[in-house]
């Protein structure tokens, strides 16, 4: 098990290095007239040269990269070009907001999709068809459209929940839940649709295996066959789908945060892209990569624990 963990950690470090290098080359190497764009069209040549020296973008690309890496390994992601603050400080204030929304949505998706998928696989018939129809409908509806519909129903008409904004959990736990209810609902509805179908397929495959028929013929309780044996063999596929859902939600959160005016990573990413704030964009990319690597390692370890064959 330790050798498996070491291999996964080593491959993750290599992946992190490759992706950050390619991202840096594409982002910083493709940035033209940065100082001109920040200062405006009326800036003089002297002002542009002075700002380029201040930002360090007048140096060769490889020098900029090694300077950035040396700071990144110490937790220093540079300074924002437009906000004048530390990128690490900006992201540290935004990351908990996005994570709270995404983690809450992932947990709900995992629980509900597992229940629906198992029900569809075990019961079949009309229950299976209804769940499949609901899943297809939910999968076909865009997150932002669902978000707008939820706002109209629960915020504008019923006035049960706030339409926009975010309340920190330390300020008011109830207000925190209320501010996340609609955005999480928009993320969950489409996520459940795809995840439940994957769980259903994995459970059907597990229930068709020969060992399941042998256990049933041996008089083992149906609940024991389902939860102790079939579900355990279907869990790797379900956990993999859940990890993909988490990664997909990180990307989908950008649109949802704009719809509900939530100050998370998605909204600052859009703002940085519009203003050309490359250090923030690079910081967001690194943060996302680290999150994806952590989630993938956690899912791989969970799969290896559930099914030791995965370690091979």
Image (tube, rainbow, N blue to C red):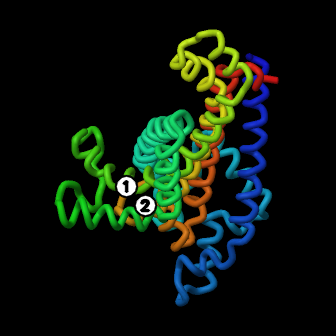
Q: Is residue 311 visible?
A: yes
User: Compared to 147, does 100 lie above or below?
Assistant: above
Spot occupied by residue 21 in the image (x, y as percentages of width and height):
76, 53
Q: Is residue 266 left or right of residue 243?
A: left
Query: Quick one: label 2, few (<14), some, or many (20+) residues within 10 Å?
Result: many
Whether residues under marks 1 and 2 lie with C-beta atoms below 8 angstroms apart, the answer is yes
Spot occupied by residue 187 in the image (x, y as percentages of width and height):
44, 53
Quadrant position of the C terminus in the picture? top right
Viewer-proximal residue among 283 and 248: 248
Q: Is residue 61 left or right of residue 213?
A: right
Q: Is residue 4 left or right of residue 261?
A: right
- Mark 2 residue element: helix
Viewer-proximal residue among 79 and 151: 151
Residue 212's image quarter?
top right
User: Compared to 128, does 238 lie above or below?
Assistant: above
Per the image, the residue denoted by label 1 is 183
Q: Is residue 89 visible?
A: no
Spot occupied by residue 275 in the image (x, y as percentages of width and height):
52, 73
Spot occupied by residue 205 in the image (x, y as percentages of width and height):
68, 34
User: Compared to 186, does 52 lie above or below?
Assistant: below
Viewer-proximal residue among 277 and 100: 100
Quadrant position of the N terminus in the picture? top right
Query: Quick one: label 1, few (<14), some, or many (20+) residues within 10 Å?
Result: many
Of callouts 1 and 2, which one flags the residue occurring earlier in the amino acid sequence?
Answer: 1
State the CA–CA distance, disc 1 to disc 2: 6 Å
Residue 165's image quarter?
bottom left
- Mark 1 residue element: helix
Per the image, the residue denoted by label 2 is 256
């Amino acid at each position: 098990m330790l050798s498996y963990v070491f291999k996964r950690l080593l491959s993750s470090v290599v992946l992190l290095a490759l992706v950050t290098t390619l991202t840096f080359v594409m982002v910083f190497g493709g940035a033209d007239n940065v100082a001109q764009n920040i200062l405006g069209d009326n800036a003089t040549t002297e002002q542009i040269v002075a700002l380029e020296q201040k930002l360090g973008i007048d140096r060769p690309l490889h020098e900029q990269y090694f300077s950035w890496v040396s700071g990144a390994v110490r937790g220093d992601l540079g300074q924002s070009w437009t906000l004048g603050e530390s990128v690490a400080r900006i992201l540290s204030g935004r990351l908990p907001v996005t994570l709270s929304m995404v983690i809450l949505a992932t947990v709900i998706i995992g629980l509900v999709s597992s229940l629906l998928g198992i029900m569809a696989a075990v019961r079949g018939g009309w229950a299976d068809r209804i769940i499949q129809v609901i899943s297809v409908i939910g999968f076909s509806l865009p997150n932002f459209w669902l978000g707008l519909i939820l706002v109209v129903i629960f915020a504008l008409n019923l006035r049960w929940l706030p339409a926009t904004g975010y309340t920190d959990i330390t300020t008011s736990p109830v207000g925190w839940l209320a501010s996340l209810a609609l955005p999480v609902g928009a993320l969950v509805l489409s996520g459940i649709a795809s995840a439940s179908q994957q769980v259903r397929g994995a459970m059907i495959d597990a229930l068709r295996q020969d060992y399941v028929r042998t256990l049933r013929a041996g008089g083992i309780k149906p609940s024991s066959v389902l939860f102790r044996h079939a579900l355990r063999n279907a869990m790797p596929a379900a956990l993999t789908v859940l990890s993909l859902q988490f990664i997909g939600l990180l990307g989908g959160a950008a649109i949802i945060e704009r719809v509900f005016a939530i100050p998370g990573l998605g909204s600052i990413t859009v703002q940085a892209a519009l203003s050309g704030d490359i250090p923030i964009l690079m910081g967001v990319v690194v943060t996302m990569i680290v999150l994806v690597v952590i989630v993938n390692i956690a899912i791989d370890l969970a799969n290896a624990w559930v099914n030791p064959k995965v370690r091979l």
